[in-house]
Amino acid sequence: MHRLYLVGAAAGVLVAAAGTPAMATQCTNMQTLALEQTTITSATDVISGTFAIPGTNPVQYLTGLPTFCRVTATIAPTTDSAIKIEVWLPESTWGGRFLGLGSGGFGGFIDYGSLALRLKAGYAVANTGLGTGVSGCNDHYCGSNGNQGNALAISLGEPANPTAGLYGHPERITDFGHRAIHLMTVQGKAITAAFYQRNADRSYFLGCSTGGQNALMEAQRYPDDYDGIMAGAAPFNRTRSYGGAPIGWQFVHANPARMMQAGQMSLINKAVLAQCAGRDGGVKTDQFLSDPRDCHFDPKVLLCTGGNLPPACLTADQVTTMQRYYAGLIDPVNGDVIFPAYSRGTEIEDIGSLSILAKQQLPEPLADGPLYWVFGPSFGQPGSAINYTNYDIHRDLKTVDDQLADQLNANSTDLSAFRAHGGKLIMYHGWADQGVASQVSINYFNALVEHDRHEHSRPHSEEVRFGERDGRRSALERTQSYARLYMVPGMHHCGGGPGPNSFALLPSLVQWVENGTAPDAVIATKYVNDTPPNVQMTRPLCVFPKIARYIGSGSTNDAASFICIPDEHDFNQRPAPQYGP
């Protein structure tokens, strides 16, 4: 039980910095709120409709905001923790709902844009940097050495003086993995209750990427925190994705002829679309794949012949690089699948989007920070016992799992406690995600179905049954009674991409939780240059495993010309059991 006290709420006045008395407000009085393990660092009324984003140079502004109370705090569950949070509370437009926001990458920052967006929608909203900022981490880096001074790494946000990240700080690893989001939720709700003098009616959580992992952690480990949870592109199997970071890098750096050149990813993507667009429910003119599992494009069709030379074609070495890219992370000794492959259709040139080009061109593997947490600063020193040049996934992944899996992996498929209190989960993932392989969300959802099938088949299991009618429902229907997945054609990692990448799932989640209306197809929009209001196309997002199929007439840019139908059985690349789901 977390106790809260409102101390000095009737203090009357506060002293302004210039010494001029200023009347206290309901918001500024929050500075004296006493919460367990928590220090309120500021409580300020923002009444101008404009907010200057801290730390931006030149200063960037958020505009069109309702009057709100901005509360900042630091939570310290241990002597080595420093979890920064912010809670934004609309002063006259609150709809009675609390909303927690996930983080991104390695955290270390507050997502002010997302706070502002949800504040405008009437939510009391909270966000945290996951407690990693104190270790010098940001969204792309939390442990690095070999990239120091590299222009590309600097452009991607590497700190001027990179550190070993969370090495030697096991409590901060726990904060990053799951504790920071939970405590943000507990104290964010307490701050909300103190400000409005009542608890929120309902609570929701949404996040993508690391935020998606935060979301699944909440459903699995803290099932009573939220009524509704939305998880996008969740890298829930984190030790296996982080543990694989050096492998592709090692392969191409062992022979520079294997590296892809500028322009070749566009070449490959064009060939993929020429062979596969329209096979999967979409239409031939689509600039994306509706279900890449139906595409079996082999890059060897682009092998240079005659007088052709790269980048207009691929060398034999480059063909091998792309075949490995489409194969997934494989244990080289026993052939076990450790992590699923990136889908066809994820081939992009944009280095800033952390494409294969960025991963190859950096002098040290991107996102290998957690390997520093395990092996220490020497991981960035070639010649040391285990470093990014000689890391052996068959030998060393077990060490990574042993030290980090309990804190970082959100692999449990038992959501019975979350389901029991009426919790609802919506997952989504872009089919063209070049950051987190889209197959992982399908694997997790399918694993939920398998868990529910097994749970329901056990004898004498009335205490875990889904309802009286459960015997007449399939395992898929039982899972979809509390969890649904949407796969988004042509969307990159958490947004962007050539497909319809703008959609509103949070209102559907609210309707599901509060009115019992289960979400069905949702309309997604592709705006011209990804900027409203000019619409390029719309397309329905179907509840997985259904897909959207063109009906044969009407505009192919209009969602009304598509229907959601059951998909045929597709092959799903799954990790070996010890690395699943």
Image: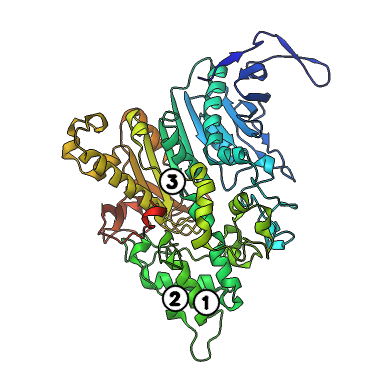
Q: Earlier in the sequence, mark 2 or mark 3?
A: 2
Residue lying at the far right of the rendered structure: 18
* Vertical order, 170 against 329 (above or below): above
Q: Which mark is residue 530?
A: none
Where disc 1 sits, the SS reads: helix
* Residue drawn at point x = 36 percent, y = 58 percent: 574
Tell me if residue 330 comes above or below residue 403 in the rendering: below
Mark 2, residue position: 299
Distance, label 2 to label 3, CA atoms, is 33 Å
Specify the amino acid type for callout 3. Phe
Q: Is residue 490 left or right of residue 529?
A: left
Q: Which labelled disc corresponds to residue 503?
A: 3
Point out the tag, 1 or 2, that comes first from the N-terminus: 2
- The image's colour scheme reads rainbow
Which marked residue is nearer to the observer: mark 2 or mark 3?
2
Q: Are marks 2 and 3 in contact (CB under 8 Å)?
A: no
Category of crowding for the residue at label 2, using alpha-carbon neighbours closer than 10 angstroms: few (below 14), some (14–19), many (at least 20): many
Q: Secondary structure at mark 3?
A: loop
Question: Residue 163 placed where, x, y %?
Answer: 70, 50
How crowded is the residue under tag 3: few (<14 C-alpha within 10 Å), some, or many (20+)?
Answer: some
Q: Are marks 1 and 2 in contact (CB under 8 Å)?
A: yes
